[in-house]
Amino acid sequence: MSLGKLYGVGLGPGDPELMTVKAARLISEAQVIAYHCARHGRSIARSVAEPYLREGQLEEKLVYPVTTETTDHPGGYEGAIADFYELSAKRLAEHLDAGRDVVLLCEGDPFFYGSYMYMHERLSGRFEAIVVPGVTSVSAASSVLGRPLVQRDEVLTVLPGTLPAPELARRLADTDAAAVLKLGRTFGSVREAFEEAGKLDDAVYVERATWGQQRIEPLASVDPASVPYFSLALLPSPAYASRQSPAPAPVPAGGSGEVVVVGLGPAGPEWLTPEAASELDAAEHVVGYGPYVARVPQKAGQQRHASGNRVEADRAREALALASGGARVAVVSSGDPGVFAMASAVLEQVAGGHGPGVRVRVVPGVTAAQAAASRVGAPLGHDYCVLSLSDRLKPWEIIEKRLDAAGAADLVLALYNPASRSRTTQLASARDVLLRHRAPETPVVVARDVGGPEEDIRITTLGDLDPSTVDMRCLLIVGSSKTRAENGIVWTPRSY
């Protein structure tokens, strides 16, 4: 006897007419219909599929033992749910072993926060398992709202409301559009996160999209006590919203705003100076490369403008335009903003005529070179040179000439941007240039992700340096002829 097949069938957001033709056919043909439900026995999934059910089908009602995290199970909520999934899988396996096909109903899409996935991971290794996708609640909410989710190069982020409010706020601030699911008891913290991210006024609350009891309201006006689980918070496409709104009044030249270019240090908040923290707190807008903006503590009402890694000039112009309207703008950089970072980019745009009348200040930060040096001792204890190996903004011939000069001058070198996915040969070439002037035994410090969760500090020599072990997150310190390395400590004497 052949085994039965397991079908995870997505039902869409609630309107039975939004179910796929394939889902409707499989439901009507199945020998066994399975669905999850709470202790009261009613199943939303079954009610959506009901028009396609037929007489004589076996029904497997999988009743959740708990619907909140309160339980007397010895393993707590997670233990109770794990036992429930194991028991449910065994019940479905009995039908499949008997050769009966089983359709497991799932609201929305089975693999989009769907309960089906827990059966899939337990049964797909033994039985043929076929997943039928469904329209998600996110797509449904966008359609009933009549607003696009994302356009062109915008980024959509889907988040569970169960995340801590600070983490939600950070992610909301760093995206163009968002959908936050699993509201209900989490609504208060979700609303707080939107407010902290400065996006509460743009967010919309959608409840039971496409159902008869559908409800749409501005998120800011929703009563938390009225929010069920089947609801979400939507932050639609900002580009669409801007086209529907009246054009802003032109900003007069010579505004009274200010741009402060702030160094965040090389890693976490412990590297941030009090002066930098104060400037970030005072800013109305924070502008910068996405990962750096994400490191800035959240503040209610503060607007964040994150962008990619290769648009320094665009970032600088955006900051100056905001300040031209009188705003206080912080442009953030990792390390020190004056070392291969945004201070030069901002001042270059000012010199080009952007942001006339805008004040620009630079607030220093701990550099990556200083951080790396501190981990091993004092390799920068005497004269040293800071050089970037990236040839994106200058030709390699210039880099090689400067390496040769620094090597001949017997300077310690701090090498930024030593390698990347697209730049795989420069470091080996740089090593060869320096070996013209330095002994192979010259100490080299390879510092990766200093202060971060993947920090790795290695001490090697110029002759043994393996470029394949170095990536963009590394900084190298190459010693002079006087630099010493003993017992994991590297230092350059103050006197020659």
Image: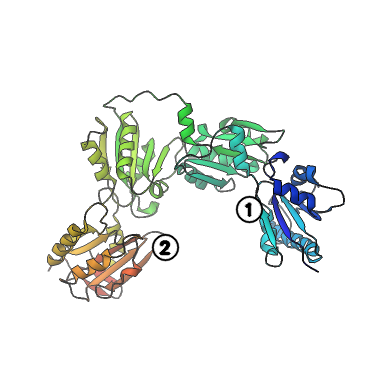
Q: Mark 2 or mark 1, which is nearer the start of the sequence?
A: 1
Q: Which residue is mark 1?
A: 111
**Residue 249 versus residue 194 in the image, above or below:** above
Determine which quarter of the picture holds residue 383: bottom left
**Residue 45 versus residue 473 in the image, above or below:** above
Q: Is residue 300 left or right of residue 374?
A: right
Q: Is residue 158 left or right of residue 73?
A: left
Q: Nearer the viewer, residue 456 or 106?
A: 106
Q: Where does the N terminus fall, quadrant-wise?
A: bottom right
Q: Are marks 1 and 2 in contact (CB under 8 Å)?
A: no
Q: How many marks?
A: 2
Residue 478 in sight = no
Q: Residue at x 28, y 55 (%)?
A: 367
**What's the CA distance linking mark 1 and mark 2?**
31 Å
Q: Nearer the viewer, residue 85 or 128?
A: 128
**Residue 408 versus residue 31 in the image, above or below:** below
**Residue 270 versus residue 316 in the image, above or below:** below
Q: Where does the C terminus fall, quadrant-wise?
A: bottom left
Q: Amino acid at mark 1?
A: Phe
Q: Amino acid at mark 2?
A: Glu
Q: Residue at x 69, y 60 (%)?
A: 129
Q: Which residue is mark 2?
A: 454
Q: Nearer the viewer, residue 177 or 81?
A: 177
